[in-house]
Amino acid sequence: MYDVKNNLREVLAQLPDHVRLVAVSKFHPDEYIMAAYEEGQRIFGESHEQELKRKHESLPKDIQWHFIGHLQTNKVKYIAPYITMVEAVDSLKLLREIEKQAAKYDRVIDVLLELHIAEEETKYGLTLEACRELLAGGEWRSLKHVRICGLMMMASFVDDTKQIRSEMMMASDFFDEVKQQYFADDPAFCERSWGMSHDFPIAVSCHSTMVRVGTTIFGPRVY
Ligand SMILES: *Cc1c(COP(=O)(O)O)cnc(C)c1O
């Protein structure tokens, strides 16, 4: 098997204490997750509801699962009982559905708002303008079972580190803007989730607090 434990240690060695690692385990088998778990890793990222359900049922209960992919509203009810964080909320509709399902289980679910900054058109997420509108609308304040903990984004998948850096800094500056405007008194709003296998060292220098790394730890995904 891919040397998961060693790879994990090498990634962790590059992260300052204030940056947490989400080990992205989608499409990887349970034994890979357990290898990371034995090294002390507890936060894992998945992006398919059924795969996550199976893993959640068979793996240790103290794993904190982050849903990192695009989440369809009709899938929220399946993950609501146990999900720790939904990282990619990109509409008020999805926020409302998380509120509704979390309420059923008497839970508060942590979420991040996903920004669309990258140039690729296929990526999901809120434009900065749409995110400003969502926050200005104020409805989120009445959602008692959803806690907005910060922002998430994916930089363009390019080799140009200057472009990656500029997109991540745009996200970081935007974080500062909304933190000041809406969350100045809310210590829970503190997460900046950017950085993947190919760009997490850049993300660390662009104020990331959470990196989502899969391939570098677990090897290429077999779809
Ligand atoms: C798959 C995925 C990752 C991890 O990508 P790697 O390149 O394997 O590190 C990170 N974030 C999101 C949203 C993903 O879907």
Image: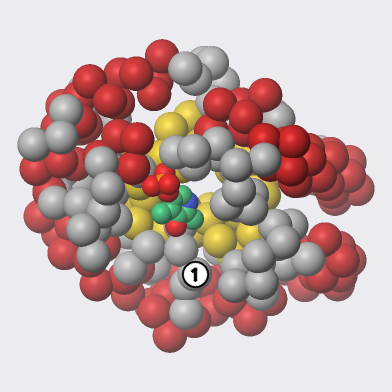
Q: Is residue 41 above or below residue 151?
A: above
In front of the other: 20 or 169: 169
In front of the other: 58 or 208: 208
Name the residue rendered at 34%, 35% in the picture.
216
Name the spot of residue 138 as percent of width and height, x first. 83, 68
List the single residue furthest toward the front.
159
Amino acid type at mark 1: His
Name the residue rendered at 34%, 18% in the picture.
10
Q: Residues within 10 Å of mark 1 (few under 14, many from 20)?
A: some
Looking at the rendered structure, the secondary structure element under dot 1 is loop
Name the spot of residue 69 as percent of width and height, x first. 46, 63
In front of the other: 139 or 50: 50
Q: Is residue 138 above or below residue 56?
A: below
- Per the image, the residue denoted by label 1 is 70
Q: Is residue 148 above or below residue 43?
A: below
Name the residue rendered at 39%, 67% in the picture.
80
Task: Please give left or right for residue 207 compared with residue 112 in the image.
Answer: right
Q: Quadrant of residue 60?
A: top left
Work out whether residue 109 can be spotted. no
Q: Quadrant of the N terminus?
A: top left
Q: Quadrant of residue 91?
A: bottom right
Q: Is residue 7 above or below residue 86?
A: above
